[in-house]
């Protein structure tokens, strides 16, 4: 395996809470895909879940910066979801998916966490370098 990129990000919950209090609709529309929005809005307190997704998208974006053509990847080109075990996963679309197709195959690993103060994410982009037979 070869690590191509690593990204990390930290988001303060107070900033996300303030953003949602001032411009909830605009913030949800800007940062989240339709599926992410359904998940975030289903939570009793959407703030930590939205903050974790913003951190995850930024971490994935940073990890992908080693690939040519990824500077213009947008918020909605990276979708954070949970697999059947609850583990965070990433789905790429738009420019991010185009870069993945052009420079892949690779895997994106994602880890999320949050406290009552902040949310953080780490993303690792790796390529499987095993020879094909």
Image: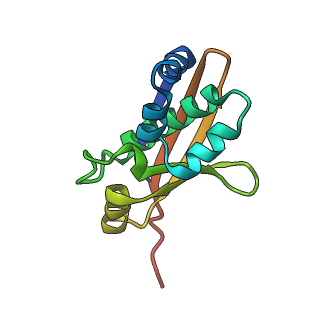
28 sits to left or right of 44? left
32 sits to left or right of 101? right
85 sits to left or right of 51? right
Depicted 77 relative to depicted 22: above or below: below
Query: Residue 36 location, x and y as percent?
Result: 57, 46
Depicted 20 relative to depicted 85: above or below: above
Query: Residue 23 location, x and y as percent?
Result: 45, 25
Residue at 40% across, 38% down? 30
Q: How many marks?
A: 0
Query: Residue 71 location, x and y as percent?
Result: 25, 45
Q: Quadrant of residue 50?
A: top right
Describe the colour scheme in one phrase. rainbow
Residue at 49% across, 49% down? 33
Residue at 32% across, 60% down? 99
Q: Residue furthest bottom?
A: 133
112 sits to left or right of 91? right
Q: Is residue 5 visible?
A: no
Query: Residue 131 location, x and y as percent?
Result: 45, 75
Residue 73 vs residue 14, the one in the foreground = 14
Q: Is residue 39 visible?
A: yes
Residue 131 vs residue 42, the one in the foreground = 42
Residue at 60% across, 40% down? 111
């Amino acid at each position: 395996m070869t690590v191509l990129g690593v990204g990390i990000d930290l988001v303060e919950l107070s900033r996300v809470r303030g953003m949602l209090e001032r411009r909830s609709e605009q913030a949800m529309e800007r940062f989240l895909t339709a599926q992410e929005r359904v998940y975030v809005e289903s939570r009793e307190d959407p703030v930590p879940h939205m903050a974790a997704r913003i951190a995850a998208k930024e971490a994935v974006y940073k990890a992908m910066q080693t690939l040519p053509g990824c500077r213009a990847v947008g918020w909605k080109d990276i979708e954070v979801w949970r697999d059947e075990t609850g583990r965070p996963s990433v789905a790429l679309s738009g420019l991010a998916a185009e870069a993945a197709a052009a420079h892949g195959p690779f895997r994106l690993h994602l880890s999320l966490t949050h406290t009552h103060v902040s949310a953080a994410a780490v993303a690792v982009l790796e390529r499987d370098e095993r020879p094909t037979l």
